[in-house]
Image: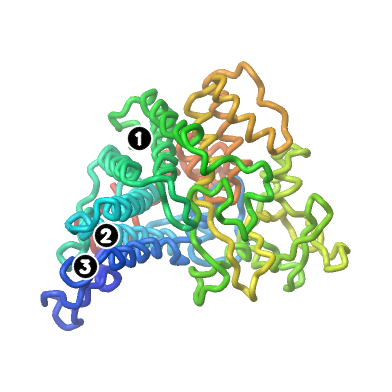
Amino acid sequence: MKTRILLILMLSGVFVTSCDLTEDPYGFYSEDNFYTTVDDAESSLLYAYNALNYIEYSRGIFYIGELASDICDVKSGEAYGSQDLNNWTTNANNETLTYYFKYCYIGINRANAVIENVANSSFDKNDKAKLLGEAYFLRAYHYFNLVRVYGLVPIQLSMVKTVSQTSPEMAKNLDEIYDLILSDFKKSESYLGINRVVGRADKVAAQSFLAKAYLTIASSKESGVPKYTDMTEDVDQMYDSAAYYAHKVLYDQTEYAMDTSLLNIYNINAPDGPEHIFIMSMNRTGSSEGEYSKIGMMFHPWVAGAPYYLKNPDGTFTYCTYGWEVFQTTDNFYNSYSSNDKRKTQLLVTQVYNSSGSVIGKKGTDFTYAFTRKYVDPNFSGQKSSAKPYLMRFSDVALIYAEAVGPTTEGYYWLNKIRNRAGLADATSGLSVTNFRDSVVQERAWELAFEGQRLYDLRRKAIVTTKDPRAISAGITEEKAAFYSLPQLEIDLNPNASDE
């Protein structure tokens, strides 16, 4: 991790001279000269949130979570190591995986800075609780991403102030990492109230990710995923814990709920809709990418290199920017939807129109794949949009709960609410626990497609090599598919890092 020394120190507010790394760091913000007011600490917390918006991190959600799955293909010639991700031929030098690792730790370091300084402050207890709650959430969120992508990773629990702190020890096992993740999310839940702010986390967000983390442990161990099988946790207990926290989200609050309309969920101008428990903050008025978004362009086809219109179910039209065709829906996935599934008929586009309502482009003629309209901003400005990654939706929690409780009355209730909203009949009754949970995972694919979720579901169920044709062609094993290698750059320069 010493490759990141200067960057991490600078991003923490620590500056060192280039000629003498043994010199005492100077000019950094500390509890003595920066964390003197709540406003100071709030600025530092916002700085920690800002780490999510680095394009290598925000785009990594899709490069990593979707490409190595049965949902998406990638355009020929796309760089950033995406071809290897897509074809399951990655190695430790993959560019996307190297940058994703880096920005996770930048986010962790910024969260650590808030935790250390606010914990030692004399702020009002309510202000302190809110600041700490969000900082603990962010640290847990980054580590949850890291463990699902790489498996065992170094554990950094203090703010980096000196060069000697840039080589943290590796976690001994997954128990150690998940103990940290679960502890931080629980602290976050205990500190925070229900307070919806776009781009920020609250109690419900912490409960939602607790449910997802517990479900990941349960299903991964049950499915025989390497490293998870060595964990000490009991599978049934983990499912029960996932259900416990998901139940809190579904039944113990009224701020968040299932949206009755699929299209409303993806209304770019309503990021505070009922579905959005945790959503990244991006706005077309921003000055640099990350502050604004180009996510839609990653999914949309080029057509003629000019904007076009999409037809809505009520016959009206929505303006849409052209795209770069980076993430391309596979035909197998498109065809896996039932013909009457609204997630296919309303959210996947096969024709585009001009302002007069005439068709100017069709799948198979003018573009090659059905594209998602989850990231359409009709008020885009040039290449700037307000499209945001959906980091946690209420429907995700509903499916977590259904999977955790299995084929019970409540499990079927929430699974069927998702299906019925999509215009589908109830799920087959009388399924075994295994078959019911498998059906929920398939429902997650249809419901959460293009939201950066699919790879992690395939991994925790140990079905990468049965679901993704490219993984099959690559001849990899489920053990190999379970985690990506740690970046070689970090292994070379952190004597404590190891990919074994």
Is the residue marked by circle 1 packed among few (<14), some (14-19), or many (20+) residues within 10 Å?
many
Q: Quadrant of residue 39?
A: bottom left
Q: Amino acid at mark 3?
A: Thr
Q: Which residue is mark 1?
A: 228
Of 435 and 161, nearer the camera is 161
Q: Nearer the viewer, mark 1 or mark 2?
A: 2
Image x and y of residue 168, in percent: 20, 56
Image x and y of residue 469, in percent: 60, 44
Q: Amino acid at mark 1?
A: Tyr
Between discs 1 and 2, the one toward the N terminus: 2
Of 363 and 356, nearer the camera is 356
Image x and y of residue 402, in percent: 53, 29
Between discs 1 and 3, the one toward the N terminus: 3
Q: Which residue is mark 2?
A: 114
Q: Amino acid at mark 2?
A: Val
Of 368 and 417, nearer the camera is 417
Side of 233 where 400 appears, left or right: right
Badge 3 element: loop
Residue that appears at 38% across and 45% down = 193
Image x and y of residue 411, in percent: 55, 25
Q: Nearer the viewer, mark 2 or mark 3?
A: 3
> Spatial distance from mark 1 to mark 3, Cα to Cα?
43 Å
Query: Most extreme residue toward the top, as rendered?
Result: 430
Badge 2 element: helix
> Spatial distance from mark 1 to mark 2, Cα to Cα?
31 Å
Between discs 2 and 3, the one toward the N terminus: 3
Q: Which residue is mark 3?
A: 36
Of 84 and 293, nearer the camera is 293
Badge 1 element: loop
Is the residue marked by circle 2 packed among few (<14), some (14-19), or many (20+) residues within 10 Å?
many
- For the N terminus, give its image quadrant: bottom left
Q: Nearer the viewer, mark 1 or mark 3?
A: 3
